[in-house]
Amino acid sequence: MEETRKNIKDFTLEALTAWFVKQNEKPFRAKQIFNWLYQKKVDDFSEMLNMSKMLRDKLSKHFFISSLQRYQQIHAKDGTIKYVFELKDKQRIEAVLMAHRDHYTVCVSSQVGCAMGCDFCMTAQMGLVRNLTPGEIIDQILEIWKDVPENEGIRNVVFMGMGEPFHNYQNLINTLKIMLADVGFNFSSRRITVSTSGLVPQIVQFGQEDVRANLAISLNGVNDTIRTQLMPINKTYNLQKLIASCQNYPLESRKRITFEYILIKELTDALEDAKQLIKILHGLKFKINLIPYNESPGSKYKSPSSDQIQIFQRYLLDHGATATLRISRGKDIQGACGQLIQSFD
Ligand code: SAH
Ligand code: SF4
């Protein structure tokens, strides 16, 4: 039978409150639902005991509570876990749990596949299959949360899995609203990072939203020739337009934009590129996250030597930039950046 009920996890607190009002129910019921779903993390209306049986029955007539199927789980030596989840329509997405010294970070997918076609990225090879709904993004966090020690919890969420979050804009915004609601997950906007390949109109729009999150931009090339070779989106929004949108981006005090920069051997790793990087970011409040290219079987690019990586980073540091090196976690499980691809078997 065709499912006519809606996934309750696709609803923001505002939308759910409006629904209760329309049903002549008490608006505060929406807050109670958020508390059950995202604090107590129940997965059945029958567990929501501060609501009458009648109301619970009504809820289950209108809504269902989604969950993800664990399709595969791969553990890396460094503790990173890559999850392959199966969605209702059998599509598969991936998410990654990274353990740090005193906290956990989850990397979520925002789409099945990706339309942006970046040359270095495995996800690009799938093309865009479909957008994920807010509930499907939220479910990645909820499912992984079950594996995290109760006293620790997940502190950071990064939108760096499959997909281009700004290409699924409204669902992204609603996901953030759900994550930030204090009666639910109560995530801090400082602990959420959205990474984009550089969709300029959405960067502008994001700067004007009430919901906030840290902004990361995948730069990867320091001139239009290289950047267009790596990221076709650069033909539409070239470096000049991208940097201009960053200059105008409203940042809260002490906040910076993160620029992710993939180091590819003999393509983006020259000292000259480091110089150019400092030049184009001049005047911005920024930090740089260097990501040595993750090779996959058969990939056409190579990772630079660790000497070259250090020379590159040194130059940036010597010129007053904050430049961190992303140690690729979960490399042995293809759970690192750009290695998220649906396995067809
Ligand atoms: N679509 C968004 C977010 C997901 S990609 C974006 O592009 O920003 C997350 C990050 O992984 C991006 O910074 C991207 O540049 C990087 N990445 C993709 N493939 C990679 C690879 N093979 N090696 C290293 N980094 C890669
Ligand atoms: Fe999409 Fe990001 Fe991969 Fe580019 S790097 S194809 S935008 S997921």
Image (cartoon, grey):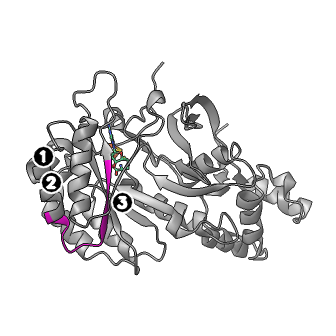
Quarter containing the N terminus: top right
Span shown in magenta: 279-290
- Residue named by callout 1: 226
Q: Mark 2 CB in 8 Å range of ligand 1?
A: no
Q: Mark 3 CB in 8 Å range of ligand 1?
A: yes
Residue under the image location 26 percent in, 43 percent down = 309
Residue under the image location 45 percent in, 62 percent down = 170
Q: Secondary structure at mark 3?
A: strand
Q: Are marks 2 and 1 in contact (CB under 8 Å)?
A: yes
Q: Amino acid at mark 2?
A: Val
Crowding at mark 3 (Cα within 10 Å: few <14, some 14-19, many 20+): many
- Residue named by callout 2: 222
x, y (%) of residue 168? Answer: 41, 55
**Identity of the residue furthest to the top in this view:** 345
- Say which mark, if any, is on residue 216: 3
x, y (%) of residue 135? Answer: 59, 52
Q: Label 2, label 1: how many angstroms apart (C-alpha)? A: 7 Å
Q: Secondary structure at mark 1?
A: helix
| Quadrant in which ligand 2 is drawn | top left
Q: Are marks 2 and 3 in contact (CB under 8 Å)?
A: no
Residue under the image location 64 percent in, 53 percent down = 6
Q: Label 3, label 1: how many angstroms apart (C-alpha)? A: 20 Å
Crowding at mark 1 (Cα within 10 Å: few <14, some 14-19, many 20+): some
Residue under the image location 43 percent in, 66 percent down = 214
Q: Amino acid at mark 1?
A: Ile
